[in-house]
Structure formats: structure tokens, C-alpha cells
Image: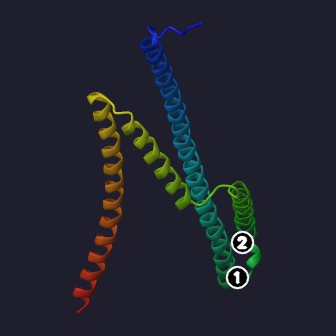
Amino acid sequence: MARDFDDAPRRIGDANDLVLARQRDADERIYVVNTNLVIDAQEKLARRRRLDRIRRAGAAVSWLSLFTAVIGTGIAAWTTGNPARFVLGDLICGSLLLMSLLALGGVHFAGRRVPSLQRLEAQLVSAQESLWQQKADRRPDLPDRRRLYFEEISTAVEKYQADSRKYRRVHNSLQRAGSRRLWQR
């Protein structure tokens, strides 16, 4: 049986449409995966920051309660000659010390499998860049390009603002130190 080649353009068009549809589906899956990677990196980064804040607060409470108990007992022993007068304060500071040490231990075990802050920030930046690259590779129309530009610029502005706050603090502390030296001369 002879093959009819009259419908060849239609079959080629159908094949092209099928290829384009599969390409769109693959692009959409990759986009979803990249979006999920960004969300996951943001959640891990937030968890690491929360654990670091708890660790700093627990360490501060531990040292403060230990320092208070030792100084308070020393003052009670020096002024009255009887350190037993500060027993209640020692018990309160000891319980605070114990609770903060338990909190530090819990934070340590909770953060064992969470990567470091720098690694998580690098993963987030990498995931965001791959997502932006994929969005740009789609050859978006003008409103989508404007939205992409706004996302990228807002991220850069936030980074520059954080850097400027850091450098402003450094500058102001150096200025204060320099002005103190001038007044001491």
C-alpha cells in the first residue's frame, strides 16, 4: 500500500506541537523544582537563624546567671561574713543556669543536621539565580520582564541596605574612637 504524503505537513505540525508541549511541560516541572528549592533554602536559612538566636540568648543567660551567682555570693560573704544569706539568690541563678544549659544542649542537638549559615545563604543564592535564569530563558513578554527585573533589583537593594547598615555601624564606631583620642590629647 502506497503512503499518502499529502498529509505530511499536518503530521509534521502535530509532531512539532507535541515536542513543544513536552518542552513546556519539562520547563514547568523544572520551574516547580527550582521554586521548591528556593522555598526549602529559605526555610532552612530561617531555621538556622532561629537556632543561632536561641543559642546566643541561652549563652548570655548562662553566663549572666553564673556571673550573678558568683558575684552575689561573694558580696554576701564579704559584707556579712555569711554566704548563706544569698542561698535563695544562688538557687535562682543555679536554676536559670541549668535551664539555659539545657536549652543550649537542645539547640545543639536540633541544629546538628542543619548546615552552616554561610552554606545555606550560598544555596539560597544559587537556587534564586537558577530560578531567575530559567525565568529569563523563557523569553518572557514585557510585563514578565519588568516583574523579573523588579525581583532582581529588590533583592540587590535589600543586600545593599544591609551592607550599608553594617558599614555605617563600623564607620560610626571608628569615628567615636577617633574623636575620643582627639579629646584625650
User: Mark 2 touching mark 1, by CB under 8 A?
Assistant: yes
Q: Say if 55 sits above or below 43 in the image.
A: below
> What residue sits 34% from the left and 44% below the top?
152
Q: In this view, does 100 lie to the left or right of 127?
A: right
The one nearer the camera, 84 or 3, is 3
Mark 2 nearby-residue class (10 Å; few <14, some 14–19, many ≥20): some
Mark 1 nearby-residue class (10 Å; few <14, some 14–19, many ≥20): some
Using the image, tell me which numbered label, if any, was put on residue 174.
none
Residue 148 horizontal/vertical position (percent): 34, 37
* Label 2 residue SS: helix
Q: Say if 130 sits above or below 171 in the image.
A: above
The one nearer the camera, 12 or 79, is 12
Q: Say if 40 sits above or below 6 in the image.
A: below
Can you identify the residue that label 2 sits on?
Answer: 86
Quarter holding residue 52: bottom right
Residue 100 horizontal/vertical position (percent): 69, 61
Quarter holding residue 135: top left
Q: Residue furthest front?
A: 1
Mark-to-mark CA distance, 2 and 1: 8 Å
> What residue sits 36% from the left and 56% below the top?
162
* Label 1 residue SS: helix
Q: Is residue 20 left or right of residue 112?
A: left
Q: Is residue 51 left or right of residue 96?
A: left
* Amino acid, disc 1: Ala
Using the image, tell me which numbered label, if any, was put on residue 77.
1
The one nearer the camera, 96 or 173, is 173
* Amino acid, disc 2: Phe
Residue 143 horizontal/vertical position (percent): 28, 28
Question: Which image quarter holds the C terminus?
Answer: bottom left
Q: In this view, does 123 lie to the left or right of 106?
A: left
Residue 92 horizontal/vertical position (percent): 72, 62
Quarter holding residue 78: bottom right
